[in-house]
């Protein structure tokens, strides 16, 4: 690399300490905001500092959907961070696509009913993403570099995998001024991504992907809320969390859990409580309930369906001649459609 005389003469003015992680993050973010995928620094910066700053970029700016890895080039006097661009999109293409993504996110925000609480906003966005996104398992297998892996695929194309669901949820929550980020880990289904969100001072986990029945069955079944506003104990039943992430919150509250908020969190099996929940949801014909423990959950399944106690609850609400039910045996959630 050719260095100018003035650069060499002034090199002692610069050191790695000249750039904190936050400053590196700000410089890279500013470049990306101008659709410039390369950022230069006037000193040598260690790779660990670059990695932490890039983690921050990915955390705070899911709208930069095109980032597809990066390369750090250093010498004694400089550092350059260059992002590879998904599908080699040009700057003009990125500007157009970024505009479409932001418009799609703003469209979701515009649909939220006026006066909604932060919990209600978080629920609305969860339900919107689940109802308007198809899980892109076929595209993932066919296209290594598809848009299915980011917020653009989810919100603009309506097709994504878990990373896309999570990035879209984070993007919209941040637009709403609600703290939200993405977390990655491993489950028995493979590598996975989901969200945390902060509501009324407490952190909760949210997994839009696993609440989408399309992810499991590929059918137009009812959306679920098994993984909406859950705590650490519930979340860790199904996955582990990767190390070395920007932020991993402690989620120890159930105050804003979907089932708690809807009076459908049951600490035992009582048929009349199930009847009440059926009556509460008669307008939709879909009742969801979570049981506190496995024993109560198993008793409910056995009593309601093996012993046919479900039909004794017709007095609470009109039950047709047929109904369907589905279970989440790890989350102890029962969904009845009637």
Image (cartoon, grey):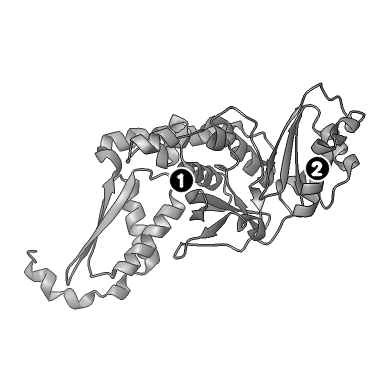
Instruction: Please give the name of the residue rendered at 46% of the width and 42% of the height, measured from the top-left corner.
Output: 164
Q: In this view of the protein, which residue sits in the foreground, 9 or 313?
A: 313
Instruction: Please give the name of the residue rendered at 39% of the width and 34% of the height, measured from the top-left corner.
Output: 139
Secondary structure state at the residue bearing disc 2: helix
338 versus 294 height, above or below: above
Q: In this view of the protein, which residue sits in the foreground, 332 or 147?
A: 332
Q: In this view of the protein, which residue sits in the foreground, 30 or 186?
A: 186
Q: Residue furthest bottom?
A: 12
Q: Please give the residue where the numbered disc 2 appears in the rendered image.
A: 302
What percent of the width, then of the height, locates residue 236? 60, 58
Left or right: where 301 falls relative to 14: right
Label 2 Cα crowd, 10 Å radius (few <14 / some 14-19 / many 20+): few
Q: Please give the residue where the numbered disc 1 appears in the rendered image.
A: 163
Q: How many marks?
A: 2
Instruction: Please give the name of the residue rendered at 53% of the width and 59% of the height, measured from the top-left corner.
Output: 240
Q: Residue furthest top?
A: 321
What percent of the width, then of the height, locates residue 205? 61, 53
Work out which quarter of the rendered image holds the N terminus and state it: bottom left
Instruction: Please give the name of the residue rendered at 63% of the width and 47% of the height, measured from the top-left corner.
Output: 227
Label 1 Cα crowd, 10 Å radius (few <14 / some 14-19 / many 20+): many
Secondary structure state at the residue bearing disc 1: helix
What percent of the width, then of the height, locates residue 158? 47, 31
């Amino acid at each position: 690399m050719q260095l100018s005389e003035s650069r060499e003469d002034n090199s002692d003015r610069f050191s790695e300490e000249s750039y904190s992680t936050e400053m590196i993050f700000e410089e890279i973010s500013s470049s990306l905001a101008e659709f410039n995928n390369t950022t230069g620094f006037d000193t040598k910066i260690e790779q660990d500092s670059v990695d932490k700053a890039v983690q921050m970029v990915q955390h705070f700016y899911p709208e930069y959907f095109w980032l597809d890895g990066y390369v750090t080039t250093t010498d004694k006097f400089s550092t350059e961070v260059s992002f590879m661009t998904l599908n080699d999109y040009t700057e003009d293409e990125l500007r157009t696509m970024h505009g479409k993504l932001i418009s799609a996110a703003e469209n979701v925000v515009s649909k939220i009913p006026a006066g909604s609480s932060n919990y209600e906003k978080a629920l609305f966005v969860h339900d919107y993403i689940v109802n308007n996104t198809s899980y892109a398992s076929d595209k993932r297998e066919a296209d290594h570099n598809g848009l299915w892996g980011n917020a653009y695929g989810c919100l603009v194309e309506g097709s994504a995998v878990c990373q896309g669901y999570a990035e879209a949820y984070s993007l919209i929550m941040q637009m709403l001024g609600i703290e939200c980020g993405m977390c990655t880990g491993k489950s028995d289904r493979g590598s996975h991504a989901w969200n945390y969100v902060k509501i009324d001072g407490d952190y909760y986990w949210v997994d839009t992907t696993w609440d989408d029945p399309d992810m499991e069955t590929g059918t137009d079944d009812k959306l679920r809320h098994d993984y909406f506003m859950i705590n650490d104990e519930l979340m860790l039943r199904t996955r582990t969390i990767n190390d070395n992430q920007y932020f991993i919150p402690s989620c120890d509250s159930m105050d804003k859990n979907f089932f708690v908020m809807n009076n459908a969190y049951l600490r035992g099996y009582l048929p009349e409580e199930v009847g009440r929940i059926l009556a509460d949801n008669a307008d939709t014909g879909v009742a969801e309930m979570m049981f506190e423990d496995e024993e109560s959950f198993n008793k409910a399944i056995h009593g309601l369906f093996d012993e046919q106690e479900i039909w004794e609850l017709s007095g609470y609400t009109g039950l047709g001649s047929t109904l369907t039910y589905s279970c989440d045996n790890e989350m102890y959630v029962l969904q009845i459609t009637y």
